[in-house]
Amino acid sequence: MENVIVILGPTASGKTKLSIELAKEINGEIISADSMQVYKYMDIGTAKPTKDEMQGIRHYLIDEIYPDELFSVAKYQKLALKYISEILQKGKVPIMVGGTGLYIKSVVENISFTETSIDIEFRKEMGRIAEEKGNSYLHKMLEEIDPEAASRIHENDVKRIIRAIEVFRQTNKTITEVNNESKKIKPIYNFNVFGLTMDRQNLYQRIDKRVDMMIEAGLEDEVKKLLDMGYGSNTTAMQALGYKEIILYLNGEISFDEAIYIIKRDTRRYAKRQLTWFRHMENVTWLDVDYYNKQYGENSIKKIIDTILQRMVFSSNI
């Protein structure tokens, strides 16, 4: 089987810079595994790499759709596998990079998705119930249907809760049963998965610094532009971290300082959830960024790349 490299980790852990340097080193191209970077016009708040930062490396699944378009994990998987095949056909190395665990899992584990349709009205009804009765009410509904899924999905992850209930409603199978059935399907590529980790406080400091940089780069203006284009707060993409808080500020519901505080706080919480998710993934080689920074300083990225290449399972496409 041909090799695909996967670099995962929490937000602000340094995945983007590392992946670009790695791609330059091994003649690779990058497939983003970020649920928000797929949207056009949402650049600053999603920490999307600029053209200069890409350094000529081809990136896929960035600016793929408009902010009001629906985008599922199944669609991500289909496109990611398509791009992996295209990259390999060019004689290059696919590098999947991101922090959206379900996107990565869908490709690495070759998950088979049930043939279920998207029921917009049902999702709206479930969303209304969550607003009226609270997220915990929906979570209890899921717990009655599928206790195992309920133990994995946080009660604030309303989107995934609704999807799990929707799958059961349409197929009479729990999402856990569907996932277990999908594990019987063998992956078609050899995925070499590397995870970036670091001291929690260091990560939180990096997150706070990144948010400050986003504000300085013009996040408020980006949100205003999106609103002017007709992408309102009810658009799924505009509920993303950083965007919904700025909208609340623009609507006069919170102060600017409160918006920044909430963005930082909730991004730190998101990073914690990402790490929890990734720790449950199998066959991940973890790389301690703090260790490499202390040992090698400015050469830390080069040394991480050396480690990745040393631990790769040999294949003709590397």
Image: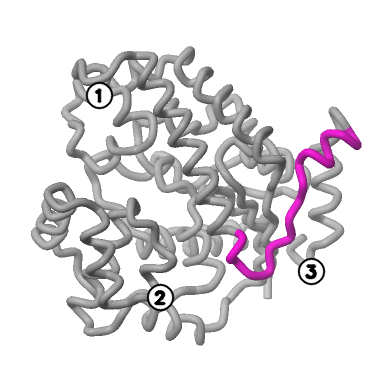
Q: In the rendered structure, which segment of residues is drawn in magenta?
A: 279-296
Q: Which residue is mark 2?
A: 148
Locate residue 259, reporting x and y percent. Answer: 36, 21
**CA–CA distance in space, label 3 to label 1:** 49 Å
Badge 2 marks a residue whose secondary structure is helix
Residue 296, above or below 280 = above
Left or right side of 119 for 4? right
> Which class describes the residues within 10 Å of circle 2: few (<14), some (14-19), or many (20+)?
some
Q: Nearer the viewer, mark 2 or mark 3?
A: 2
Per the image, the residue denoted by label 1 is 248
Amino acid carrying mark 3 in the image? Val
Task: Tell me where residue 218 sits by quadrant.
Answer: top left
Residue 285 falls within the magenta-colored stretch: yes
The picture places residue 35, in percent across and down from the top left corner, at: 41, 48
Q: Quadrant of the C terminus?
A: bottom right
Say whether marks 3 and 1 touch (CB < 8 Å).
no
